[in-house]
Amino acid sequence: MKYAICNELYEGWPWEQVFTHAASLGYSGIEIAPFTLPANDAYALQLTTLQQIRNQAESHGLEIIGLHWLLAKTKGYHLTSPDELVRKKTGEYLAQLAKICHQLGGKIMVFGSPPQRNLPAGVTPDQAFDYAVNVFQSVAPVLESYQVTLAIEPLGPEETDFILTAEQAVEIAEAVDSDFVKLHLDVKAMSTESKPIPEIIRNSKQWLVHFHANDPNRQGPGMGTVDFEPIFRTLAEIDYQNWISVEVFDYSPGIDALAGKSIQYMRQFEN
C-alpha cells in the first residue's frame, strides 16, 4: 500500500517541517488542500513557488499526490448553482487547480467541497445532477491535458445533501464520460451508507482511483470504532494500487498521535 497524509493537519507549519515529519513516520505522499498554499488566490500562485514546494517534498522522498478540499475557503464558486456564469467560473477555477496540481507533480484532485455542492433553493436533485455534469465536462479537456484525474467524493448527509453515495457519484462520472473523472471513497463518509463498506468498495472497483482513511469520530484510522481489517482485505482483493491518504478533522489528539498512530495501525494489515 502507498500511504499519504493530508497536509491541513499541519496547517501553520513550514513546508520543510511538514515534509520532515511526514517522511519520518513512513509516509511517502502528501495530499494538499489549496487553501494551505502560499497565496490567497489560486490564480496568483507562481510556478517558481510551486516548484520549490515540490522540490522540498521530493528531497524528503515524498510525492505530492494531488489536491483535495478544492473549493474550501473560496467565494463565488458552486457546482450546482442554477446560474450558468457561476458554474462557468467554478469550472474555470477547477481547471486552474488542475494546472496547479500538475505543477506540483500531483495526479489526483478530490472533489468534496460540501457547501459548494449543496442544493441551492429551488434546485431539484435532477437539475443539480445536470449542473454538476455540465461543470465536470467543462473541466475534462483540461484534466486530460495535464493528466490529472478529478475524483468525485460521496459524503454523508450531515455534510451535504448532494452525492451521498458511491453509486450516485458513479452515475455522475458515467454521465461526464471522461477517463479523467472517476470516484474517490472515504471511510467516514461510507460509514453513513446502508451497505457495508467492503460491498461499496467491490461495487465501485472499476471507478475507484483514490481512498481516504479516517473514522466517523473524525480522527485517524484505528482511533475510533471502524475495523479496517476487512476494508484493507477488500482493497487487496480488488487489487487497489493507488494511494491511501489519511484525512482527519478532529485535531485534538495532536499531530504526532494522529499521523503516527494512523500509519502504524494501517501497516498491520499489509500482506
Image (tube, rainbow, N blue to C red):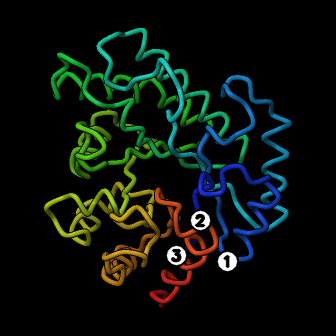
Q: Examine the rendered structure and indicate whether residue 107 appears above or below residue 40.
A: below
Quadrant position of residue 31: bottom right
Check disc 1 and report its element: helix, strand or loop.
Answer: loop
* Foreground label between 3 and 2: 3
Q: Is residue 138 left or right of residue 83?
A: right
* CA distance for labels 2 and 1: 9 Å
Side of 158 relative to 52 (left or right): left
Which of the numbered marks, if any, corresponds to residue 4?
A: 2
Mark 3, mark 1: which one is toward the viewer? 3
Task: Please give left or right for residue 149 compared with residue 105 in the image.
Answer: left
Q: CA distance from mark 3 to mark 1?
A: 11 Å
Q: CA gap, disc 3 to disc 2?
A: 11 Å
Compared with 47, 248 (above or below) is below
In the rendered image, the residue lying farthest to the front is: 252
Depth check: 240 or 157 in front? 157
Please indicate whether residue 165 sits to the left or right of residue 217 in the image. Answer: left
The amino acid beneath tag 3 is Ser
Residue type at the position of mark 1: Gly
Residue where numbered disc 1 is placed: 26
Measured as percent of width and height from the top left, residue 120 is found at 26, 21
Q: Residue at x 43, y 43 (%)?
A: 179
Residue 106: image location, x then y, percent: 64, 49
- The kind of secondary structure element at disc 2 is strand
Q: Earlier in the sequence, mark 2 or mark 1?
A: 2
Identify which residue is drawn at 75% across, 29% down. 45
SS at circle 3: helix
Q: Which mark, residue 262?
A: 3
The residue positioned 47% from the left and 31% from the top of the image is: 140
